[in-house]
Image (cartoon, rainbow, N blue to C red):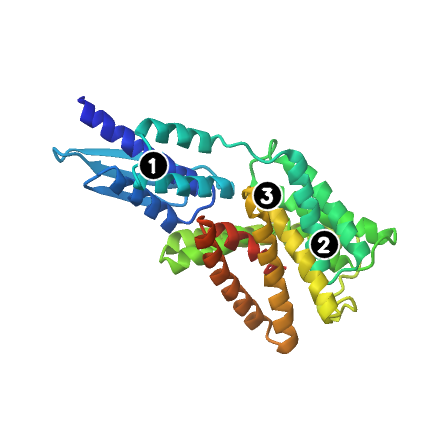
Amino acid sequence: MNNEEIMTGVELEIILKAGKILLSSGAEISRTEDTMNYIARAMNFKDLEAYVSNRGIFATAKKDDNTEITRIYNVPEVDINLRKIESVNSLSRRITQKSITIEEVINELEKIDTMPDYSIFWRLVAYTIGASGFSYAIGSSITDSIIAGIIGLILGVYMCTIKRILNSDVLITILGSILIALLGNLFIHFNIGSNLSVILLGAMIDIVPGVPFVNAIREYSQNNYNTGITLMMGALLTCISMAVGVAVVQSLLFNTQMIPLYTSNLDSNSFTSMFMKSIMAGIGTTAFAILFRARKQHFLDISILGFITWFLFLTLSELQSNVMLSIFISGFIIAIASRILAVKRKCPAIIFLMTSLFPLLP
């Protein structure tokens, strides 16, 4: 094996490892393919054929003598990490500008792949403020919002522990929703809190499969129908698991009345009320910036976008009664804002889009 063949193999490994990090961190297939192609062109590959799915990457490269090198990478379960996506995106720009050596690229990819997570303390803070913030945003009282935050904290302890024991996402979600419903009903049973619906919805936001739903739509828009269907089915299965957990608690253990949101007397939408709810939605959005490992310098931008998302939705809902239209317009405006902000901050739009749309999920 000559030096050229060895170098070609190393470069192909670099391209596939960059793609693997992106996919396993929650990047869409189109972004992964584009990044791999940018790196390949910068490394002067004459022909690179790559097939990317949500669970694997298959790539073949041709050398000057027309022989081929083929590599297959298995992609593990997706664990959203926006810092890794941003870091690989930044590294690909440096490779394209040819301002970094092969050895430096290998070292950088290794650092990105082993990048440390936020501490358990910050993840528990995220679960707490996420549940409390979104509970208040959808119409709870201050007391119910605090209760949702307490349940969110307990859920965070459960999630940080259970993933070391169980590998089944379905079972983890069912047990998590049972825990949420059980705690919510216990608070109501002892007359601590008044509206079970907003308490449960606020706490449930921490396990709602928002990312798979958003990514499924984005894959559909890029004509990646197989991946889109896979993500959508996974998200629907998670929703069913959540419903099963709540149904078990409500039907077998408690008979607490679930007050529909539209009949709740908590949903006063004066300007002051909408403004305060939107602030809490912005704070709740920051929770997902932590859980999705966004860089700290993006927290303020993400919080502001979350605020704008919910304020737009509440304002549009007041002006007309079509909820779907309000969601569509709010989401469309935020998608544009995310793209503009991404250009300004020189980072992928997914960092802002994946987090700022969460207020619309309840």
- Could you give the CA–CA distance between mark 1 and mark 2, rounded to whole angstroms? 42 Å
Please give the residue where the numbered disc 3 appears in the rendered image: 291
Secondary structure beneath dot 3 equals: helix
How packed mark 3 is, by other alpha carbons closer than 10 Å (few <14, some 14-19, many 20 or more), is: many
Residue 204 x %, y %: 67, 52
Secondary structure beneath dot 1 equals: helix
Quarter occupied by the C terminus? bottom right
The amino acid on which the numbered mark 1 sits, given as a three-letter code, is Leu
Which label's residue is closer to the chain start, 2 or 3? 2
Going 50% across and 41% down the picture, which residue do you hit? 83
- Could you give the CA–CA distance between mark 2 and mark 3, rounded to whole angstroms? 20 Å
Which label's residue is closer to the chain start, 3 or 1? 1
Please give the residue where the numbered disc 2 appears in the rendered image: 200
Which label's residue is closer to the chain start, 1 or 2? 1
Secondary structure beneath dot 2 equals: helix
Going 64% across and 46% down the picture, which residue do you hit? 174
Going 79% across and 69% down the picture, which residue do you hit? 265
**Labelled pair 1, 2 in contact (Cβ < 8 Å):** no
Q: Nearer the viewer, residue 314 or 236?
A: 314
Please give the residue where the numbered disc 1 appears in the rendered image: 16
Relative to residue 181, is residue 48 depicted above or below?
Answer: above
The amino acid on which the numbered mark 3 sits, given as a three-letter code, is Leu
Relative to residue 104, is residue 185 depicted above or below?
Answer: below
Is there any visible trace of residue 201 in the rendered image?
Answer: no
Relative to residue 262, is residue 7 depicted above or below?
Answer: above
The residue most toward the right is 191
Foreground disc of the pair 1, 2 = 1
Residue 231 x %, y %: 47, 51
